[in-house]
Image (cartoon, rainbow, N blue to C red):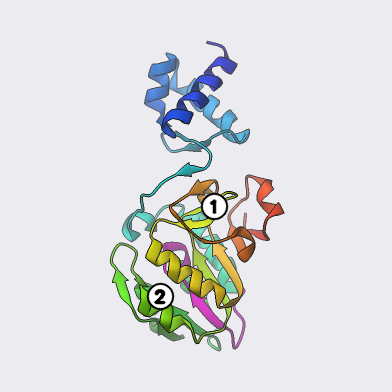
Amino acid sequence: MLTQDRHCAILNLLKTKSSVTLLELTTLLNTSESTIRRDLTALDKAGKLRKVYGGATSIDFYTADEKDIHTKHDLQITEKNLIAKKAASLVKPHDLIYIDAGTTTELIIDHLTEKKATYITNGIIHAQKLTDKGFKAFIIGGQLKKSTGAIIGTTSIENLQPYNFTKGFFGTNGISLQAGFSTPDSVEACVKKTALKHCQKAYVLADSTKFDQITPITFANLEDAIIITDILKDKKYLDYTNIMEVL
C-alpha cells in the first residue's frame, strides 16, 4: 500500500473511533510497526492527528474521562516541573495568589520562594505543602472531591467572592479553539470559573498534551488567561491568547 493510501486509511479510521492503537493499524494495513510509527509521526507533524503512546488520537479528541490524582501525578513530570518553575517565578512580594487544585499547579509550590505573598487554594495537598514550607496560606471551604483532592461546591464559590487575586494559576484538562479551557466536572468548572474571574492576571498551566483536547465543561475562553506550556506545536493558538513556552 502506498504511503498516501495508508495515511488516508488511518485518518478515515480516526473519524469513526477517535483513537487507534499500533496493533490495530498494523493488522488493518498489513504493514510493519515501524512503518506505522513513521506514518503517525508524519501525520502528527502535519497536524492531522495526535501521536500518543501506543497509537494515535484524532485532533480535538473529546473525552469525559478524568484520571485520578495519583494516575496523573507522574505524567509528563519533566514538562510539568518546567512549567511550574516558570509560574513560581512570576510571584512577587505582596501578591495575593490563587492556586487551583491539580498536579501541575501543585508543583508550583516546590519552586516558590516568595514568603511575602499570600496564597489561597482549593487543593488539600496544596494547602498542606504551602504551610509545611512556611508560606502564609488559606484554603477555601466546601466539599472534598476525592479523585482530585479539590475543594468544590457552592460553599467554595461563596468563599471566593471577597478575594481580588493579583495572580491565579489554574490547571485544565483540555485546550481547544472550539471549547477554550475545559474540564470534565461541572461543579469543579464553576469553582475554576469563579476564581479566574477574581484574578487580575490568570495563567493556565498545561503541557502540550492538553492542546486540541475537549472535555465536557468550558470554564474560560482562551483570551481569559495566559497559557504556560512546554512547547507550542500549533502556532494558531497565538492568535487567540498570550503563550509562554518553557522549552
Q: Comparing marks 2 and 1, which lies closer to the viewer?
A: 1
Q: Residues within 10 Å of mark 1 (few under 14, many from 20)?
A: many
Where 153 falls versus 50 (above or below)?
Answer: below
The residue that appears at 47% across and 69% down in the rendered structure is 192
Could you tell me which quadrant the C terminus lies in? Answer: bottom right
Q: Quadrant of residue 149?
A: bottom left
Residue 22 in view: yes
**Local secondary structure at mark 2:** loop
- 92 part of magenta stretch: yes
The residue that appears at 64% across and 45% down in the rendered structure is 234
Where 170 falls versus 133 (above or below)?
Answer: above
Going from N to C along the chain, the mark reached first, 2 or 1, is 2
**What segment carries the magenta color?**
90-105
Q: Pointer 2: what residue?
A: 122
Number of numbered discs visible in the structure rendering: 2
The residue that appears at 34% across and 60% down in the rendered structure is 69
Measuring from the top left, give residue 155's x and y in whole percent: 36, 80
Q: What residue type is labelled 2?
A: Asn
**Local secondary structure at mark 1:** loop
Where 14 falls versus 62 (above or below)?
Answer: above
Q: Pointer 1: what residue?
A: 179
Measuring from the top left, give residue 64's x and y in whole percent: 38, 49
- 245 part of magenta stretch: no
